[in-house]
Image (cartoon, rainbow, N blue to C red):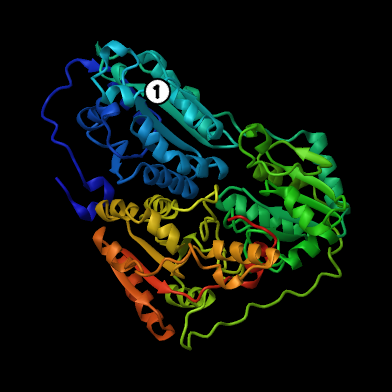
């Protein structure tokens, strides 16, 4: 029975006419997923977990968790990633055997780099070779399947019994949701799932296996940090990976106001501080702008709230000189660093490390701050954002941003993703859900799946979910939108389409200039043209509404308004906007310095 008016929960309801009778190994796994309060499991079907699939449908009735069918395993994990970025809670993703896990690896890496809890289940053909079907079970069985993702997950396991599977699920959930959060992977033996166990064994309660409560900073260290901040004449706060709760947001604002500190934010991590607040410094970017670098150098005390690449930010300010600031770091990120992935970045100098969650550090510091004289007496005046008229013959990327802001109006909106071509002050944020940041791993293709997962989490919130994607990212992941359409998940996707993998054109430009070769050839092997893919048709092929291509500024407002109306009505809309190739100045400078996004 399907009832589209009810959204995801109203779809794909099974007929439950029989008592379960004897129980099976996969029934225990399904019941533990319910015990863990996972609302959804996104999946692409596969025989390796056919037992679990049956349990989710015919034992649980396809609810709590509900299955969400995806057309690619990478989309399934990306959906879980986007969902967690909004809610802070994991949802499940199930991938088929070694082949499905190999499809999913990029999305798992994104979640790892983004420090987001994602609960990935997989399966293998029967570990007992005597139980394998000819050919297919052999090529879908691996000796150590978790090794594929072990370097970018917090934990993986392959339990060998039903009791071990229950404990494995509890441990995985606890590890995924204990900061610093991250993805986990559990591989279920097909034979274990399909083993008859008769009576259902007693199952443990997840309430007794919750993540530990957040630790408080050492009182002496907190007092030392407060003393440094109280005495600072030019305190600077770097807001990185922080919580999306409104209470935490308000505490960060109060901390900055109590200190008179200038605040820098990071486009990679999303909304962490109101962009229009008088204490917000130069606009956020993926790398510090020249103005932000000047403030980093002038600051006498820097408080880093889990800033991504603190050493890189300090180098932007100090160049090859040792950083002359006092550095306070509030972060737990060191607990997940390993020797395979260099996502931990360069080692930053740190005078005081508060080994706690950044928002816990903020809450501990606030009561220790004293009334003080205004800081930064020589602070430079902020540069106002220039108005971008929606006129002319071509659409620069920042005109698309201005037109989208105008079309959205005063509606509460979540910018799920923004393109590299936008400047940092293109999209103002006043709430922690106004912008979600990047994908973590810097690959291409995860944007559509993450957008669907975030839109699922935002459904019913009153917020308009908007993802502005590059054309390369959209084309790699467009079939993720089928899941949004099928499960009635409203979503607006705007494609900032320059018909190119343009970021790499800039890299080829740089190489040519360094080597004295023709810059005019930079487009070869980069342009997505002859033919130009019909993005509107691709959207309609997934069941959504497609608008465009929009090539002229005077066409833009009408198309965006029509797309927003579609989404408000519960639909999925894609607007293909052909933008003039180019980046905002701050981003072009970052590319010239050798950025690899």
Residue 180 seen: yes
* Image x and y of residue 588, in percent: 64, 68
Q: Residue furthest front?
A: 517
- Above or below residue 232? Residue 384 is below
Q: Is residue 188 left or right of residue 382?
A: left
Residue at 37% x, 43% y: name it: 76
Q: Note whether residue 207 is visible.
A: no
| Residue 287 position within the rendered picture, expressed as x and y whole percent measured from the top left | 67, 59
Q: Is 14 rendered above or below residue 518? A: above
> Which quadrant does the N terminus fall into?
top left
Kind of element beneath mark 1: loop
Q: How many marks?
A: 1
Q: Quadrant of the C terminus?
A: bottom right
Q: Is residue 526 left or right of residue 124?
A: right
Name the image quarter holding residue 212: top right
What percent of the width, then of the height, locates residue 562? 32, 75
Q: With respect to residue 95, does 430 lie above or below?
A: below
| Residue ID for mark 1 | 142
**In x, y percent, where is residue 436?**
52, 55
Q: Is residue 428 left or right of residue 186?
A: right
Vertical placement of residue 167 versus 320, above or below: above
For the point 64% across and 57% down, the residue is 595
Q: Is residue 121 left or right of residue 280?
A: left
Q: Classify residue 236 by image quadrant.
A: bottom right
Residue at 85% across, 58% down:
372
Q: Quadrant of residue 23?
A: top left
């Amino acid at each position: 029975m399907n009832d589209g008016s009810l959204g995801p929960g109203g779809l794909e309801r099974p007929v439950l006419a029989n008592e379960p009778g004897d129980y099976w190994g996969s029934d225990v796994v399904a019941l533990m997923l319910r015990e863990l309060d996972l609302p959804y499991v996104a999946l692409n079907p596969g025989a390796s977990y056919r037992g679990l699939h049956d349990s989710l449908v015919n034992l649980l009735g396809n609810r709590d968790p509900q299955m969400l069918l995806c057309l690619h395993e990478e989309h399934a994990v990306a959906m879980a990633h986007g969902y967690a970025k909004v809610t802070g809670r994991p949802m499940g993703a199930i991938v088929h055997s070694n082949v499905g896990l190999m499809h999913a690896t990029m999305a798992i890496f994104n979640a790892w780099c983004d420090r987001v809890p994602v609960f990935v289940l997989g399966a293998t053909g029967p570990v007992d070779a005597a139980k394998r079907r000819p050919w297919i079970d052999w090529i879908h069985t691996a000796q150590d399947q978790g090794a594929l993702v072990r370097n970018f997950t917090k934990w993986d396991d392959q339990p060998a019994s039903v009791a071990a599977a229950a404990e494995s699920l509890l441990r995985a959930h606890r590890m995924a949701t204990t900061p610093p959060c991250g993805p986990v992977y559990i591989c279920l033996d097909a034979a274990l799932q399909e083993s008859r166990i008769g009576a259902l064994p007693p199952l443990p309660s997840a309430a007794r296996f919750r993540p530990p409560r957040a630790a408080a900073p050492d009182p002496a260290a907190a007092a030392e940090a407060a003393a440094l901040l109280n005495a600072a004449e030019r305190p600077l706060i770097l807001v990185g990976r922080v919580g999306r709760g409104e209470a935490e947001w308000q505490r960060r604002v109060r901390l900055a106001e109590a200190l008179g500190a200038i605040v820098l934010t990071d486009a990679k991590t999303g909304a962490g501080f109101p962009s229009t607040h008088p204490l917000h410094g130069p606009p956020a970017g993926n790398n510090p702008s020249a103005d932000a670098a000047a403030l980093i150098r002038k600051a006498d005390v820097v408080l880093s709230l889990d800033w991504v690449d603190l050493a890189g930010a300090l180098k932007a300010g100090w160049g090859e000189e040792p950083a002359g600031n006092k550095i306070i770091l509030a972060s737990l990120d060191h607990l997940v660093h390993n020797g395979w992935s260099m996502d931990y970045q360069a080692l930053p100098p740190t005078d005081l490390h508060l080994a706690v969650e950044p928002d816990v550090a903020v809450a501990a510091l606030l009561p220790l701050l004293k009334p003080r004289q205004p800081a930064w007496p020589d602070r430079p005046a902020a540069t106002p954002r220039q108005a971008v008229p929606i006129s002319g013959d071509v659409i620069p990327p920042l005109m698309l941003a201005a037109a989208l802001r105008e079309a959205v109006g005063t509606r509460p909106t979540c910018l799920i993703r923004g393109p590299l071509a936008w400047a940092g002050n293109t999209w103002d944020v006043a709430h922690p859900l106004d912008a979600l940041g990047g994908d973590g791993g810097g690959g291409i293709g995860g944007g559509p799946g993450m957008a669907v997962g975030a839109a699922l989490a935002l459904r019913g919130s009153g917020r308009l979910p908007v993802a502005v994607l590059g054309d390369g990212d959209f084309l790699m992941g467009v079939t993720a939108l089928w899941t949004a359409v099928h499960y009635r998940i409203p979503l607006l996707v705007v494609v900032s389409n320059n018909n190119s993998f343009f970021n790499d054109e800039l890299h080829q430009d740089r190489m040519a200039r360094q080597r004295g070769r023709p810059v005019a050839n930079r487009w070869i092997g980069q342009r997505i043209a002859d033919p130009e893919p019909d993005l509107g048709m691709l959207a309609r092929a997934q069941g959504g509404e497609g608008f465009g291509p929009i090539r002229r500024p005077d066409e833009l407002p009408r198309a965006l308004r029509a797309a927003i109306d579609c989404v408000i009505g519960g639909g999925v809309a894609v607007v293909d906007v052909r933008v003039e190739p180019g980046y905002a100045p701050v981003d072009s400078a970052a590319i010239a310095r050798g950025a690899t996004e």
